[in-house]
Each structure stands twice: as structure tokens, then as C-alpha cells.
Image (spheres, rainbow, N blue to C red):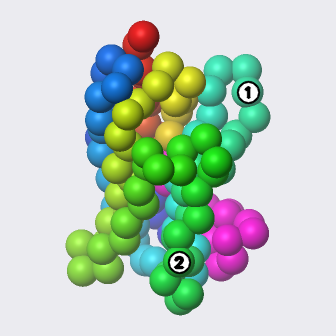
């Protein structure tokens, strides 16, 4: 079992930045962030393959969001720049043995971006 705990959400105006942090009990091969807006399906945001040392991003966040892993601190962060109202969602930290299937999720943190 993997424990994941997110922090860093909040309310900001469009164009501002937020940094989300997730503390994990142990790293899995793939660590990532997903989000879910009200009435919408869960959406992948960013994933980091810890063995390949590669990151993947949804087209909607490329160039604005950056995922990073710190094994010493046991954190996986999501730096979010140039936030848009469309980024409003609950953001979940996620982990799995493959980037094709993230099986473990934290409880989520709310991000709200106003126009």
C-alpha cells in the first residue's frame, strides 16, 4: 500500500502560479498528478516515470506545468504557471507500477482559478 498526501492547493487569479506537493510513503515506477473538475471525468495532468526518468504532460498543460520528484524528501511536486480558469479542479497525486495505470490516489487538493 502506498500513502499519498497532497498539499498546496488554493485560489488564485488567472496568470498566477501555484505549487502542489505530494508526500509519498514509497515511490512507485510511475508518479503523477491527475485532476477532476465538477461534472467532468478524471484527467491526466502529468506523469513521471522514475526508472526511465521521463515526464509526460497533457497537451492542455504543456509548457505551463512541471512535475518533479525528490526521492530524498519523498515528494512529487507540480509547479503550475500561467494558471487558467480551465485549470480549476481537484488535483490528486497518483502512483502506479506503470504509467498506463495509476492505482493509488491521495485525497486531493482543490485548485480554483478565477478570471
Element marked by disc 1: loop
Please report contact status of discs 2 and 1: CB closer than 8 Å, yes or no: no
Q: Residue 11 carries which label?
A: none
Q: In this view, does 110 lie to the left or right of 59?
A: left
Question: Relative to residue 85, is residue 9 drawn left or right?
Answer: left
Please name which of the two marks, 2 or 1, marks the residue nearer to the observer: 2
Question: In which quadrant of the rendered image does the N terminus lie?
Answer: bottom right
**Outermost residue toward the left?**
73
For residue 90, above or below residue 60: above
Please say whether residue 50 is one of the residues in the magenta stretch: no
Residue at image position (50%, 20%) is 85
Q: Where residue 29 sits: x, y (%)?
A: 57, 81
Q: What element carries label 2?
A: strand
Per the rendered image, the range of residues in magenta is 92-105
Looking at the image, is 15 positioned above or below residue 8?
above
Give the CA distance from mark 2 to mark 1.
28 Å
Q: In front: 67, or 40?
A: 67
Which quadrant: the C terminus? top left
Kindly identify the residue that appears in the image at 50 percent across and 40 percent down. Answer: 91
Instruction: Please give the residue where the numbered disc 2 appears in the rendered image.
Output: 54
Amino acid at each position: 500500500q502506498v500513502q499519498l498526501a497532497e498539499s498546496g492547493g488554493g485560489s488564485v487569479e488567472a496568470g498566477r502560479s501555484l505549487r502542489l506537493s505530494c508526500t509519498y510513503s514509497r515511490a512507485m515506477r510511475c508518479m503523477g498528478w491527475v485532476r477532476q473538475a465538477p461534472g467532468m471525468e478524471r484527467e491526466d495532468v502529468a506523469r513521471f516515470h522514475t526508472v526511465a526518468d521521463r515526464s509526460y504532460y497533457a497537451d492542455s498543460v504543456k509548457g505551463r506545468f512541471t512535475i518533479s520528484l525528490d526521492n530524498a524528501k519523498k515528494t512529487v511536486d507540480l509547479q503550475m504557471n500561467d494558471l487558467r480558469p480551465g485549470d480549476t479542479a481537484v488535483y490528486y497525486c497518483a502512483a502506479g507500477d506503470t504509467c498506463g495505470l495509476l492505482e493509488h490516489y491521495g485525497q486531493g487538493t482543490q485548485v480554483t482559478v478565477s478570471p
